[in-house]
Amino acid sequence: MAMASISLTDQIDVSNGAHILYFYESYEGYLSNAVAFVRTGLRQGQEIVLIDSLDNQRLIYERLTDVIEEKEFEHIHFFDHREFYGKYGAFHVKLILESLEELFQPFVNRLLTVRSWGHVYWQDQADILEQLRKYECHCDTSLSEWGILGVCVYDGRHVPANVQNEMLKSHEYVMTDTSLAKSTFYNQKGKTVLFPSLAVHTQMQSEVDLYKQKLEFAHVVSHEVRNPLTVIKAYATLLQNREEDRSAQAKLQAIIDYVDVIDNEITHIINTEQMLSSESLWVKSKIAVAPIVCEVLPMMVTKARTQAIALHSECSLGGETILGNAIGLKLIISNLLSNAIKYSHEGGTVWFKAGVQGKRVVLVIRDQGIGMSEEQTRKLFRKYEKMNHEKSGQGIGLFMAKQLIDHFAGEIEIASVLYQGTEVTVRLPLSEAAS
């Protein structure tokens, strides 16, 4: 029969009664993980038992006041770890376990779901390392029986490596400041799965939730904006077909072009938010590159025309394929071309070339625009980093392109000279080479 599971975070489940060993190295990482652990438990309607030093409790409390409501503190039960672990003088395993049972039994009797965070307090004594090993072994059995999710915390700098290895045998999971994994020492048959740490995962989940909200908003805006755009384009096309004056035709064509550009920008925003918020869109398969290039280029030519920029393209691709996905490749090409157009001077030219070199598809985008300094080039690919704040955009385009290129096992190279222009080269392995 499969073992029941409970949620460690909103997206990660662990076995019921899971026993997690946490060796921390960074004090800031420790506090962040403690706060994330408490917040997740409260969101899931759990009681929180937090056994820690009074100083740590104060800092954790202060951080929690910024992220939870005051009434939620009723479900957090603070205990001084010096008093809890050290009230018998020496570290006495049997007596501490009795105190642990006395603490948790009322929750168990009331059928409440509990998660426990215990920063183990110990002092030097002749057999302390053996006592710690025994305590963790018995604690593993007790937490499993009670169905309590428990994290036992130690300063990794003060516990010898051989004792850490022994402790891993009595903990199903092991955690560091930045990761969480199944302990291979605990269950040799289990497959080790690496997760982000609690704090890192909470931050990641918050970003994903934000992207999902932005995606929902983009869909609403898309619906509200595209309807009038369709009408505008239809009337402009109708008038253009009836108009004989070339100057008037050109102005009507400009209206049609701008409508197409706006519609494409909406699609681009939605595709970007989808890639940021949905794992399914990162699934890779064999895709032909040429059809995607041919689909993106006409729209980019239109966009360039609205800014009085010429886009010259050369494509020598045939039926070559890469391991990737269509939306991702469209985003790579359109982001890089959009940047080249955006940062070019009016009346300038952008060049695009697509071909094959060896076992890789190579895309080259070159412009004679404003270029970048060495310092600006070093800051590329950071999320929300903009090289020119006078230009529109969210600063996420290059970040997204780099993430996708890495995901496709490719590489990107950027050469730029300030006030002279930029050349971007993207190399993506052919599907045969990638596999």
Image: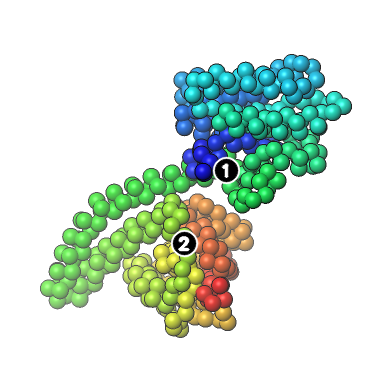
408 or 183: nearer the viewer: 183
Assess whether mark 2 and mark 1 are in contact (beta carbons under 8 angstroms).
no
Q: In which quadrant of the rendered view does residue 176 lie?
A: top right
For disc 1, the marked residue is 200
What residue lies at 20% left-to-right and 76% top-to-bottom? 246
Q: Earlier in the sequence, mark 1 or mark 2?
A: 1
For badge 1, the amino acid type reads: Val
What residue lies at 42% left-to-right and 77% top-to-bottom? 290
Q: Secondary structure at mark 2?
A: loop
Q: In which quadrant of the rendered view does residue 172 lie?
A: top right
Query: Which numbered dot is residue 87?
Result: none
Q: Position of residue 307 (x, y in %)?
A: 36, 66
Disc 1 to disc 2, how far (Cα)? Answer: 23 Å
Report crowding for label 1: few under 14, some 14 to 19, many 20 or more residues within 10 A (C-alpha): some
Quarter of the rendering occupied by the C terminus:
bottom right
Query: Which numbered dot is residue 283?
Result: 2
Viewer-nearest of discs 1 and 2: 2
Q: Position of residue 247 (x, y in %)?
A: 21, 73
Q: Secondary structure at mark 1?
A: helix
For badge 2, the amino acid type reads: Val
What residue lies at 78% left-to-right and 36% top-to-bottom? 159
Q: Look at the picture and state if 299 lies above or below 200.
A: below
Badge count: 2
Q: Residue furthest left?
A: 242
Q: Residue furthest front?
A: 1
292 or 376: nearer the viewer: 292
Q: Look at the picture and state if 147 lies above or below 205.
A: above
